[in-house]
């Protein structure tokens, strides 16, 4: 069964940790918190319950996260939701939710960011074609 895809908006609660597997594949993990905003009986905005998630990203995305994201950064994460249950020392079970991230971005409704395009080296044996985005933009007069 496929894992459900989600998009979640929240704040990073600890600096991301960049690590590498034994085969030198980069991965980054960080925790984020997301709270529901709702109005109370008097019409004032209040924060609802907070959900904490562990986010994991791989390869170039992981390296970009390590360079761009820090504790307190407002992010938008898209990926696959997973749950895991852990036995606690007191005999109870605790359920945690994790996201295997496909994409992580800065929430531009709460911050500004300067984007720097990264260059990717092709995998061994990959067929490399010209990058249409690398050439200068040619205007054909169409406004969109």
Image: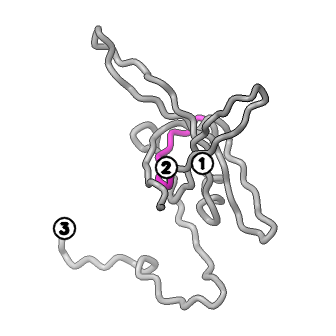
State which tag comes first along the sequence, 1 or 3: 1
Secondary structure found at label 2: strand
Mark pair 1, 3: CA separation = 39 Å
Q: Which residue is mark 3?
A: 143
Mark pair 2, 1: CA separation = 8 Å
State which tag comes first along the sequence, 2 or 1: 1
Q: Please tell me whether mark 1 or mark 3 is closer to you in this view.
A: 1
Residue 139 coordinates in the image, percent (x, y): 26, 76
Which residue is pictured at 49% across the width and 49% down the height? 77
Check the image and report above or below for 38 versus 58. Answer: above
State which tag comes first along the sequence, 2 or 3: 2
Q: Which residue is mark 2?
A: 77
Residue range highlighted in magenta: 72-80
Task: Give yes or no for residue 54 being in the magenta stretch.
Answer: no
Q: Which residue is mark 1?
A: 55
Which residue is pictured at 77% across the width and 69% down the height? 24
Label 2 neighbour load within 10 Å: few <14, some 14-19, many 20+: many
- Disc 1, disc 3: CB below 8 Å? no
Which residue is pictured at 42% across the width and 76% down the height? 133
The answer to whether residue 23 is left or right of residue 73 is: right
Seen as rendered, the residue at the extreme right is 22
SS assignment for the magenta stretch, majority: strand
Label 3 neighbour load within 10 Å: few <14, some 14-19, many 20+: few
């Amino acid at each position: 069964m496929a894992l459900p895809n989600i998009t979640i908006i929240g704040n990073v609660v600890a600096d991301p940790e960049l690590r590498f597997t034994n085969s030198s594949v980069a991965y980054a993990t960080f925790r984020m918190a997301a709270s529901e905003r709702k109005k109370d009986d008097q019409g004032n905005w209040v924060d609802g319950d907070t959900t904490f998630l562990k986010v994991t990203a791989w390869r170039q995305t992981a390296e970009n996260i390590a360079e761009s994201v820090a504790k307190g950064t407002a992010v938008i994460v898209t990926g696959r939701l997973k749950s895991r249950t852990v036995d606690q020392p007191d005999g109870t079970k605790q359920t945690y939710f994790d996201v295997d991230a496909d994409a992580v971005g800065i929430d531009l409704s709460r911050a500004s960011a300067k984007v720097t395009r990264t260059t990717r080296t092709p995998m061994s044996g990959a067929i490399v074609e010209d990058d249409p985005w690398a050439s200068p933009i040619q205007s054909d007069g169409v406004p969109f």
